[in-house]
Image: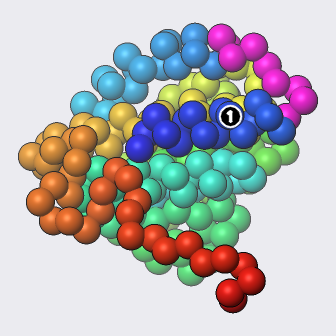
Amino acid sequence: MTSSFTTMLLTALALLDKSTPDCNILSNEADRLLPELHHWASQQPIAERIVFVGSGALTHIARESALKIMELTGGKTPVLWDSALGFRHGPKSFVTPQTHVISLISSDPYTACYDNDLANELCSQFPTITQTTIGPGPGADIRIKTDLPDHWNAVLYVLAAQVLSVHWSAALGLNVDDPFAGQGTLTRVVSGVKLYPPEDA
């Protein structure tokens, strides 16, 4: 499931974005990040709740990140995702004192102003939460060191959730490759979907 997301995203970008960069930039940065991410994940206790927030393309990475935590913890960890601006309203009521908030900070300086404001606001309003910031800025807890735009860096941002979900899944005693083993409710390959010809609609 994890490799499928990364492969499909990179394939779509390579087909549709004429400014395709040297993908060695991404693979080299992933190689640099992975040891740091495993160390970071090993220090994170399973949260009461977890939230992922991001702007623009990173809103959708927040969604994929939330999905990864839900899947690999077998639905045992309540998860929410939202845009940085959208989260300021009703969704913020999801936060409890033991919530872990992961803020995906944009590489766009203007957008990052709003992302950082939200991160600072949450720390002020909820002083007991755990917050992790991911982004290119020197103040980020997990720093992404490329000059690429967010839609290309997306595969690097999502690594944090992919690694964290594996650690939490193992800590819960689940089968990391099949957290829903024996339940028959969720599988790696979607089945049972009936396709209807458009003319029959």
| Lateral position of residue 185 relative to residue 55, left or right | left
Quarter of the image where one finds residue 1: top left
Residue 152 drawn above or below residue 169: above
**Residue 9 is at least partly visible in this image:** yes
Nearer the observer, 44 or 126 = 44
Most common SS among magenta residues = loop
Residue 123 drawn above or below residue 35: below
Residue 32 drawn above or below residue 165: above
The residue at the far bottom in this view is 201
Measured as percent of width and height from the top left, residue 2 is found at 43, 39
Name the residue at 34% across, 39% down.
164
SS for dot 1: helix
Residue 158 drawn above or below residue 94: above
Nearer the observer, 87 or 8 = 8
Name the residue at 80% across, 34% down.
15
Nearer the observer, 167 or 185 = 185
Q: Amino acid at mark 1?
A: Thr
Magenta run includes residue 23: yes
Name the residue at 60% across, 68% down.
87
The residue at the far right in this view is 18
Measured as percent of width and height from the top left, residue 149 is found at 78, 32
Report the label total: 1
**Residue 98 is at least partly visible in this image:** no
Q: Which scheme is used to colour this image of the protein?
A: rainbow
Measured as percent of width and height from the top left, residue 190 is found at 40, 60
Residue labelled with disc 1: 11
Q: Dot 1: within a 10 Å radius of its alpha carbon, few (fewer than 14), some, or many (20 or more) residues?
A: few
Question: In the rendered image, which quarter contains the C terminus?
Answer: bottom right
Residue segment shown in magenta: 17-25
Measured as percent of width and height from the top left, residue 182 is found at 12, 60
| Lateral position of residue 96 relative to residue 167, left or right | right
